[in-house]
Amino acid sequence: MRSSSLLFPATALASSSPDWSTARWSKCSAPCGIGIQTTEVGGESFNRVCNVESCSIYDEGSSAQFLPDPKMDLPTSSSTWRSTGGSIVAVTEAYDGTDCRAQSALVDHDQELFVAKFFIKLVGEHGVFGVMPQVVVTFASGASKIYLNFGEQSVSAEDGLDNEWFEIAQTRLMTAASDHGITAEQAADESFMTCRFAAVVRDPAITYLADQAYLTTESNLASMVPKEDLLFNGDFEIATDNGLFPIGPGWQSQSNAVLETVYDNDAPSGKAYLRARDRQSTDSGIYQLLDLDEFDRSRPVEFRFWGKFSEESQARAIMEDDGWNKLSLNLVVDYITDGVADSYSMFCTSGCVIPDNQWRQYAGICGLDEWLISTPATVIDQITEVKVKINGAEPGTIMDLDNIRAAPYVRKEEWKAGANLRIDEFRKNNVDIDVLGFPDGSRISFEQLSYEYPWGSKWNWECEEVVPDYKNYFPWYFNYGFITNEMKWQAVERIKGVRDYTKGRDARFFLEILVFISFLSSSVLSVGSLI
């Protein structure tokens, strides 16, 4: 099999301002099916994942994409790839290491997101400029062409000695032919118009190699990208500047947070993690829509992720009295009931935001089952959207996130056998009951007056504010307790350097004195109360 790519002259368009990392990445170790790239920055090596699509996207005649000969392996005499100016020749150097193919037959897909991708290697020394996929529609009548531009991507400057292959991957929402003045009859006539796929390079003087191209819908591509659980790209190995980042459900910015990929060897999972910066409110963060076909509304979902935090300036965000500096993960449900759109946010997990630039893992379990039980039945079949949202840190806090996982919760059963043994050993005792002297048919009842093992619950001041006479109820039922919030960092130090232990000390005093002492001396607890 001959290995080749195609050599193109550039299409002349206006220049664009640079917006690209200067890191030079090696060629991906695989042209598809997940490969690895490496780079060196400051004497340290970094890796990143590349070409995550299934190799079937390049199959001959694949129904998943709209370009014939996507590998560009046909000889130029029979290839459907053409140059818009200058000459086009086949060369032996290829990106994929096999062979190549192309031509485009785009059909009308109204309001569908399309993904275009190809690889380009620039010949000689060059500066920074933009590269853009484009679909050009021409008409047999000679009418003006329609240019359907995808997003533009910058390539970094190179000295021409060892130029790299750049991956160009961008998206575009396709509109109906009628939006361009084309009738349904005309669109159905194959001779009326022709759609061609083009690689547009902003520097008209540059020569380049092109290889491995595809044009497909977002839904087709999403089915060809690995997905470990309910979330797509939870380890953020697909970078924010990659055109594949938003495909499928994809991660989106919440409240204008700036999202960027960080390559660092301390990433908890894989080669990279996500950073949310320039956050202007506690609502700034990230979210992703769940696929409702995969999401079982009757089962709880277990979430796990890693986070670390730092401050964008020396001034630390002040935690106001009406809120704590918490990281939170919520399930947000959009639904329609009685013809009215509504939304419900379900709290799943939270944790302290400590801006010390150290990774910590967060986890929680939640689901829609309890909400659906208390919600009118008409809502159940009218849920329009469910999304996972992570936010909550104070403005000015940089949020780094990695390895976000969401999967149906499966309760592990291994603990039961050991728990039952411990119940038999520590929670049970043999009792001899002497019923001699009682006549036949007598009814005997028992009342538990005390117990020797700890029996406890959580304590916080919020309960005391909500439940009247809570301090008197608590020692009647329990002889142990633990403090939930009053000793936590965000409750003690709402303002940096100002620490208030008052509520924590009061809670400890209550548990030690009122619970431990008064309960042991005077409480009587019936079996019925325990149940």
Image (spheres, helix red, strand yellow):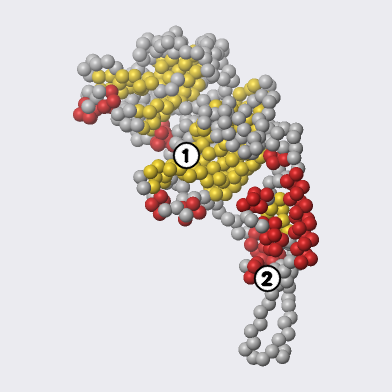
Q: Residue at x 47, y 54 (%)?
A: 374
Label ID, residue 526: 2
Residue 244 in view, yes or no: yes
Label ID, residue 289: 1
- Quarter of image, res 335: top left
Q: Residue at x 69, y 24 (%)?
A: 314
Spatial CA distance of label 1 from label 2 is 50 Å
Q: Are marks 1 and 2 in contact (CB under 8 Å)?
A: no
Q: Earlier in the sequence, mark 1 or mark 2?
A: 1
Q: Which residue of the protein is positioned furthest toward the top in this rendering?
A: 205
Label ID, residue 232: none
Q: Amino acid at mark 1?
A: Leu
Q: Amino acid at mark 2?
A: Ser
- Quarter of image, res 324: top right
Q: Residue at x 24, y 24 (%)?
A: 182
- Report x, y in % for residue 205: 44, 8
- Quarter of image, res 109: top left
Closest to the observer: 100 or 528? Answer: 528
- Badge 1 marks a residue whose secondary structure is strand
Q: Across the whole image, how many numbered discs are drawn on residues?
A: 2
